[in-house]
Amino acid sequence: MLFFDDIALRGSRRTRQIACHRGDGHHRLDLAPDGRARTEGQGGPKPDVEPSGGLGLLFSGSLGQVIYQNRESGSVLAILAPLVPLIYMDIVVDSMNFGLNQQIHSLKYSVADSLVRITLIFTLIPVWGVAGFFVAIFSGTILNSLLSLRRLVRVTKIHLDVMGWIVKPFLAAGASGSGVLLLFNIWAPALPDGLLLIMEISATVLLYIGFLFWTNCVTREDADWFKMRFTNAAPLPRPQAGRSKM
């Protein structure tokens, strides 16, 4: 259960904008003064954290009951829930690779993904049935995501903070979800299933965000960036004019 979607390069007063030459195109990359892509300590690339996959896993039974009027259908949602953040991450990482003139590599990864899925579907479904289909979907998605992320790391020299981007959000998600489920199991108000589900999800998200700030996975700088990005409170920083070679 992963709780990050993508890695974004964010602006900072302590960084400089340079133009990186890749093949036949020029691409801007936000680097730290030492010439490497910014790290977390410098306000650099951090995961945009969102708990959609975890919510689908924690509340799969309730979602199945509310949406399909069948609690057993939630088991399928629980199985597919971990794919949600991986798919989101893959889309964003592929877009960043395209911007860095790495589209040929992305095409190779997509072809490899398709070949793996087709091979596993033909070999596993006759033996395992639907379980074989799930194995094929997971294998292809994980392969494509990891290859694309590996390429992005190689090109941009991004330092992946496993503890801050994966471990801590994972623990925060588990703590917040388990806490809310325990609370509502002890105190279950007599409300319609849909309204009760909304209350549980809202409480989980709020508690999750609180844990992220408490563990320093999300900082005030991230909140300010989010405010600038999605409101008109302040203009976004613009890249400096001119080009320079790495």
Image: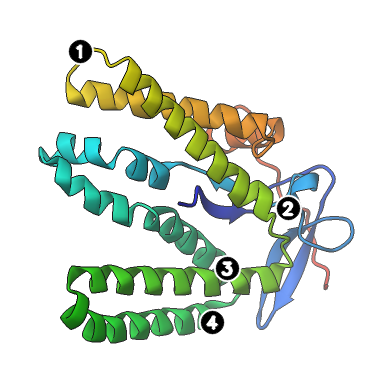
- Identify residue for label 2: 239
Image side of residue 12 versus residue 120, left or right: right
Disc 2 on helix, strand or loop? loop
Q: Which amino acid type is marked by label 4?
A: His
Q: Which amino acid type is marked by label 1?
A: Ala
Q: Mark 3 packing: few (<14 Cα in 10 Å), some, or many (20+)? A: many
Is mark 1 in CB contact (under 8 Å) with mark 4? no
Q: Quadrant of residue 116?
A: bottom left
Q: Residue at x 74, y 48 (%)?
A: 40
Residue 194 position in % (x across, y down)? 20, 26
Upstream in the sequence, badge 4 or badge 2? Answer: 4
Q: Which amino acid type is marked by label 2?
A: Pro
* Distance between the alpha carbons at the discs numbered 1 and 4: 54 Å
Q: Mark 4 packing: few (<14 Cα in 10 Å), some, or many (20+)? A: some
Colour mapping: rainbow
Mark 4 or mark 2: which is in front? Answer: 4
Q: Is residue 26 above or below residue 161?
A: below
Upstream in the sequence, badge 3 or badge 1? Answer: 3
- Identify residue for label 1: 190
Location of the C terminus (image quadrant)? bottom right
Disc 1 on helix, strand or loop? loop
Mark 2 or mark 1: which is in front? Answer: 1
Is mark 2 in CB contact (under 8 Å) with mark 3? no
Mark 1 or mark 4: which is in front? Answer: 1
Residue at the outermost right position: 34
- Identify residue for label 4: 105
Mark yes or no: residue 100 visible. Answer: no
* Distance between the alpha carbons at the discs numbered 3 and 4: 11 Å
Mark yes or no: residue 43 visible. Answer: yes
Is mark 3 in CB contact (under 8 Å) with mark 1? no
